[in-house]
Image: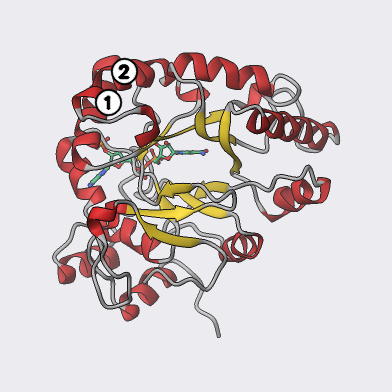
């Protein structure tokens, strides 16, 4: 299940759960961490927070999430919830006898802050989150607000951002740095510029209706962890959850379509950050201790894909 055939290694999160990881056995998925190319460990399942932007909503979602075992929170400057998350964690970490180092916090550089201002943008995010460091800071998008996609300045601004992120990592503002929505071309450009630190993570849209297998292979070759967003199709989009093939597999396995979608990625060593508000959804999404048989993985991998001749 957690094959080590690429450079990322999987370990269990707590010594209390020393369960042998093998293809046949179920593992407490919520305790699985992946080793990033920096050597740091990151939970393979986390909580997405886009559109969670009211204090009570954030507080309650984080409360249910921490109680269910989530230890990774994915935020971004553009979600406008960093401050709300900071406040909620101040109250909730002691409630669960946790400290800052027990949770992995990700936030992202807004496209309007790309360039030399990236360092200051991270300082602002830290202040909002009420913390001295984040565990992962991502360039949210290869796009730069105000610069056309065809303008050569855009590559320069991305490079300036990356240099600022490298500086922030050196200075301890963030433990890891990475990117989001980068395709092979963007990653190749970044690696060619060679600023000594490779992205630890590339966070991209990834679900059975939308996945770029060549990008996954490229990331695996370079030791960059692929982290999926919109694993359930995204807020307001029920196409995936209502897909007949997915529903059929879910009913056969006695799981919900959401669990099948998350387990599908997880089983391919892809990190997931489903967003949910209700206790029921939050608990379901982290309960991934089952195996999708190979034949069903093949079906999920070929949904809406043109079959090879
Ligand atoms: N880097 C980027 O550019 C980028 C882009 C998009 C998202 N993200 C990150 O990825 C996270 C997840 O992606 P996403 O927010 O687009 O969408 P998602 O996780 O694919 O889907 C969220 C939707 O699914 C519903 N849901 C959650 N669990 C469910 C379950 N067990 N059964 C049925 N429905 C369920 C949620 O409803 P309730 O809320 O009502 O529970 C919500 O409407 C975001 O929150 C954000 O942190 C990053």
Asked whether 111 or 308 is in front, the reply is: 111
The image position of residue 135, as x and y in percent, is 49, 35
> For the C terminus, which image quadrant?
bottom right
> Which element type, helix, strand or loop, lies under badge 2?
helix
As drawn, the residue found furthest toward the bottom would be 309
Q: Decide if residue 29 is on the left or right side of residue 72.
A: left
Q: CA distance from mark 2 to mark 1?
A: 6 Å
Q: Is residue 265 visible?
A: yes
Q: Decide if residue 161 is on the left or right side of residue 60.
A: right
Some atom of ligand 1 lies within 8 Å of the CB belonging to the residue at label 1: no
Residue 90 - label = 2
Q: Mark 2 packing: few (<14 Cα in 10 Å), some, or many (20+)?
A: some
The image position of residue 234, as x and y in percent, is 38, 42
Q: Determine whether label 2 and label 1 are within 8 Å by CB.
A: yes
Q: Decide if residue 165 is on the left or right side of residue 301.
A: right
Which residue is painted at 75% across and 36% down in the image? 149
Some atom of ligand 1 lies within 8 Å of the CB belonging to the residue at label 2: no
Question: What residue is shown with label 1?
Answer: 93
Which residue is painted at 33% across and 15% down in the image? 87
The image position of residue 164, as x and y in percent, is 72, 28
Quarter of the view holding residue 130: top left
Residue 219 - label = none
> Which element type, helix, strand or loop, lies under badge 1?
helix
Asked whether 253 or 30 is in front, the reply is: 30
Reply above or below: 110 against 176.
above
Q: Mark 1 packing: few (<14 Cα in 10 Å), some, or many (20+)?
A: some
Which residue is painted at 16% across and 66% down in the image? 251
As drawn, the residue found furthest toward the front would be 15
- Say how the picture is coloured: secondary structure
Which residue is painted at 75% across and 33% down in the image? 163
């Amino acid at each position: 299940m957690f094959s080590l055939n690429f450079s990322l290694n999987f370990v269990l999160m707590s010594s209390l759960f020393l369960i042998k990881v093998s293809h046949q056995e179920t593992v407490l998925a919520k305790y699985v961490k992946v080793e990033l190319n920096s050597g740091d460990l990151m939970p393979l399942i986390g909580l997405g927070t886009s559109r969670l932007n009211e204090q009570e909503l954030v507080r309650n979602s984080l409360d249910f999430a921490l109680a269910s075992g989530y230890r990774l929170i994915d935020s971004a400057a553009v979600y406008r919830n960093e401050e709300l998350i900071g406040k909620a964690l101040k109250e909730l970490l002691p409630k669960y006898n946790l400290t800052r180092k027990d949770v992995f916090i990700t936030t992202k550089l807004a496209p309007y802050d790309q360039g030399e201002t990236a360092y200051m943008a991270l300082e602002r995010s830290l202040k909002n989150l009420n913390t001295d460091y984040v565990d992962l800071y991502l360039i949210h998008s290869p796009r730069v607000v105000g610069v056309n996609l065809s303008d050569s300045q855009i590559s320069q601004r991305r490079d300036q951002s990356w240099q600022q992120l490298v500086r922030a990592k050196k200075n301890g503002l963030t433990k890891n740095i990475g990117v989001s929505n980068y395709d092979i071309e963007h990653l190749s450009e970044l690696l060619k510029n060679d600023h000594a630190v490779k992205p630890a993570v590339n966070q991209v849209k990834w679900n059975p209706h939308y996945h770029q297998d060549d990008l996954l292979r490229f990331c695996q070759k370079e030791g960059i962890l692929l982290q999926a967003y919109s694993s359930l199709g995204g807020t307001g989009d029920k196409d995936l959850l209502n897909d007949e093939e997915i529903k059929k597999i879910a009913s056969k396995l006695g799981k919900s379509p959401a669990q099948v979608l998350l387990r599908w990625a997880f089983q391919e060593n892809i990190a997931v950050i489903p967003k949910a508000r209700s206790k029921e959804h939050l608990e379901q999404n982290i309960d991934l201790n089952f195996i999708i048989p190979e034949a069903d993985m093949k079906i999920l991998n070929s949904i809406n894909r043109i079959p090879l001749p």
